[in-house]
Amino acid sequence: MMTASLLAAACIILLILVALIRDSHRHEPGSTKVARNVAHQNPAGSVPCPPLVRQIFSPEDFTFISKLQSQHLSQIYSRERRAVALFWVQQVSRDASRVMREHRLVSRRAEHLRPSVESLLILHYVDLQLTCGCLVFLIWTFGPHPFASLAGHAGRTSRFMALLLASIEAGLRLPTPENEAGF
Amino acid sequence: MEDVFKSATSRNASDDLRMRTLAAIPGELARLVYLASTRDYNSGRYHHEGLSARFGFEQAQKALEEAHRAAFADLSSLSLERLVGELETYLQASHEAAGDFIATWQELEPYRIAIPKETDAAQVQLFLSNVRIGLEILRCRQEENRTGLPASSPRPLPGL
């Protein structure tokens, strides 16, 4: 009970922080223009859901199997599709961790970091990992099909992070021998 | 200029492959299997004598690789119902006994080698899973047709 309440409170605080950071980012002078454009013109909600997510989580295949009226086939389908859905979720989570690790290494060498953009990236990363964690539990327990929209959110957040990272890293000025020598 | 020429030649090789060869092959699955068969298992390079003679080895290789990826993308994006239809079409075109075909495909999983290189892992998993389910559906249908009764003795699927 205590743990669930703490988890819910943490999620609410994170959502508030995301909203605040997005709001402050509009007013921060000198923010990377490209990163700002990505954050505002392509918020995670408007990034299209990857087609693969729709395929895995869509009820269309489930409906087809149900119409066959075979318990044996339904069991096989349920087991197979659950495994594929979990594979996808774990892949998304792993890929996000990997790109964040790489970004950390790149940004350590960068001369100009934009804290609000970096914070936005971190918050989306935490959002994504929390969503993936929830999805793993929910898919294991109930199967993938009731959670198409949550999976879609994970897919869009993953894509949005990729766009944001690309724009951040395009805008980062990395030290070169000429810079370091003062030329 | 050279890139434009190469791109145009590659497009011509792709068009030639599509119109002369792939158009004659019925079904998405059959086209995928054919394109996969042009790939060398050891090197991963594609070979097609006629296409290479007309457009050169590199352009032919590029056209085959692109066609292979496109065929896999098309097939793997099909719904389960349509994939079962493709399996049935392929089965009928093979002129093999249905029982033998299904048993062999379920045991050996030859469709694994039809997957192009560097394909998204989750997309691959979905494709393999759907083919396994599709084969089991066909097996149950075949058993029902043979006995007139619903299939009651499920075979254990390899890998599960």
Image (tube, coloured by chain):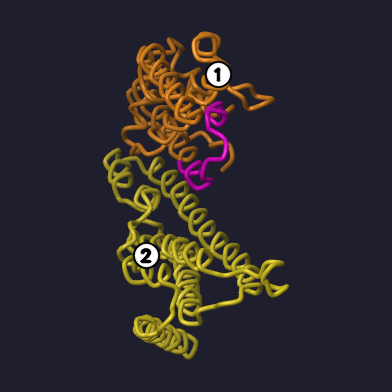
Question: What residue range appears in magenta?
Answer: B109-126
State the orange chain: B
Picture residue at 30% right of the left edge, 64% below the top: A46
State the residue in front, B34 or A80: B34
> In the visual, does A1 lie left or right of B150?
right
Q: Quadrant of residue B27?
A: top left
Picture residue at 39% right of the left edge, 40% below the top: A73
In the drawing, what numbered circle is on residue B61? none
Give the letter of the chain under mark 1.
Answer: B
Q: Of helix, strand and loop, which one carries label 1?
A: loop
Picture residue at 34% right of the left edge, 65% below the top: A42
Amino acid type, callout 1: Thr
Q: Colour of chain A?
A: yellow
Name the dominant secondary structure of the magenta segment: helix
State the residue in front, A151 or A23: A23
Residue A102 in the image: state x and y as whole percent.
62, 65
Give the letter of the chain under mark 2.
Answer: A
* The N terminus of chain A lies in quadrant: bottom left
Residue A26 in the image: state x and y as whole percent.
34, 81
Q: Quadrant of residue B57?
A: top right
Q: State the residue position of label 1.
A: B38
Q: State the residue position of label 2.
A: A153
Whether the magenta-drawn stretch holds residue B110 is answered as: yes
Q: CA distance from mark 1 to mark 2?
A: 40 Å
Q: Are callouts 1 and 2 both on one chain? A: no
Q: Of helix, strand and loop, which one carries label 2?
A: helix
